[in-house]
Image (cartoon, rainbow, N blue to C red):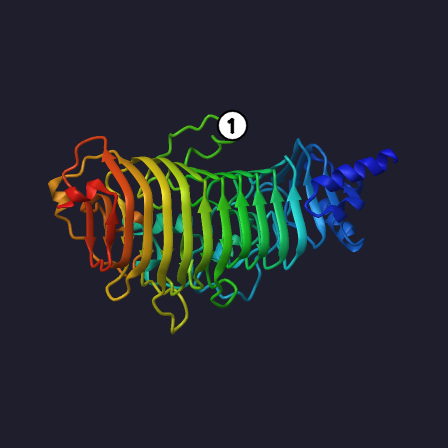
Amino acid sequence: MTRRDLTLGLLALSLPFPAHAARQIDVRDHGARGDGITLDSDAINAAILAASRAGGGTVILAPGRYLCFSIRLTSRVTLLLSKGAIIEAADPARHAGRYDLPEAGIDQLYQDFGHSHWHNSLIWGDDVHDVAIIGPGLIHGIGLTRDGPGARWKKQAGERPLSMQAMTAAQIANLEPAAAAMAGKGNKAIAFKNGRNIRLSGFTIHKGGHFAILATGTRDLRIEGLTIDTDRDGIDLDCVREVVVERCRVNSPNDDAIVVKSSFALGSAIAAENILIRDCDVTGYDMGSVIDGTRTTIQTIAPDQDRVTGRIKLGTESNGGYRNIVIEDCRFTRCRGLALETVDGGVMEHIVARRLTMRDVTTAPLFLRLGDRRRGPDGTGIGAIRDVTISQIDARGIDHRFPAAIAGLPGHRIADVRLRDIHLVYDGGGTAADAARQPAELADAYPEPSMFGILPSWALWARHVERLTIDRFTAQTRAPDQRLPFHTEDAPGLSVQNTPLWRARH
């Protein structure tokens, strides 16, 4: 066996698509410099195209800093980021060039600009298959923007979180510039539209723009072992099927860390289904401080004027609904808790969340919301949430204002929710006035745990839910709280077992 044969064999063992080992292309052979000064995106795109035209292969980025605008992925190509290899997002305000223009002709009526376009990214693939990005290198999105216009659908009650009500028009415009201002800018680190058999493994993303990773309509996607420390969303899975996300660290103080959506971005209501999120860490430390290990906590408020985000969520975009989703063995630190939301007509069903630990929870540890925003075409109705099992949850250091909350609607109850082996520790401090509050329904409001204000119980608040099962639910406060621990309203079929604290609810 020759040394080349041995090298090919070892490389094949490490590749998600072993056949890609047969052809290795170094981007430097196509003119890339990796000096952090020369624009290398043309050379990298040439290497990718050469691999694709030859039937597939591995495109290798050796150690170096590769300054790039848009990199276009093609089918049957693995992009290998070697240790010490950095893809740096160029800045069109400083460098001679621009990102690929956002696609034309897309109706951005029911979802924002970021969800509606993919080509305006640092790395993108459209309808590709058998594609991987792997290796211990870094994607540094320093030249990306986190901003972009909101949806053209305007119904202020449901377009933005209620926590943003006090913001001025100028402040909102700063976060949501006009679409014309986005031409030539990149606002995602990695974006996939449609496609299948995609693997992302091992690398780090620092400052990923609006989305560090956006996958829309993609199936058979596996994301593993990534570190993402970013200025807005971490991993967004929109209208996807057959997806595994595991062993990832996602720090995103300004928005969600790992989020599953089912928007109208592809022009129809498509469910997100058969998804496993496992053994991941989500946090809301200061951006960049997870990568450098300092884990600092200077920032306390996110752009929506609520406390820092960084959670795992299903929602808010929810036209197509969610089916068969498991979230297990994950850790939440200094961030909002688990949120399960459908407000745009989709059905959420067969959801399992288990073995989750949470520390320094900035809003509710658990939040289930069926709402009536209906951001969708005429005929969009009210969705449903049913068959949800949440078990083995240990959450501590929780903001006293926000108990675990289950909030359906009058005539549209959330159904068949099972809470088992739940342990919650709150900071405490609720007052008698808090206990007397009667939260409004807010049917069409943007869903967030803070939407109802301080709730009248401190451990669990449940309204408009049927066949709720509570088994082995323990909770405590670190300081006195004048509210009762539990409050239920319009909850037929309620079953409570092995929960001594329940006796104190009256």
Q: Is residue 450 above or below residue 415?
A: above
In the image shown, does 184 or 485 lie closer to the viewer? 485
Residue 23 visible somewhere in the drawing: no
Q: Is residue 96 above or below residue 378?
A: above
Residue at image position (16%, 43%) is: 503
In the image shown, does 3 or 188 lie closer to the viewer? 3
Where is residue 279 drawn, in percent x and y?
49, 40
As drawn, the residue found furthest toward the front would be 498
Q: Quadrant of residue 150?
A: bottom left
In the image shown, does 41 or 409 lie closer to the viewer? 409
Residue at image position (55%, 49%) is: 185
Q: Quadrant of residue 350?
A: bottom left
Name the image quarter holding the N terminus: top right
| Residue under label 1 | 292
Residue at image position (37%, 58%) is: 387
- 210 relative to 407 in the view: left or right: right
Q: Secondary structure at mark 1?
A: loop
Question: Quick one: label 1, few (<14), some, or many (20+) residues within 10 Å?
Answer: few
Where is residue 35 drawn, in percent x and y?
70, 33
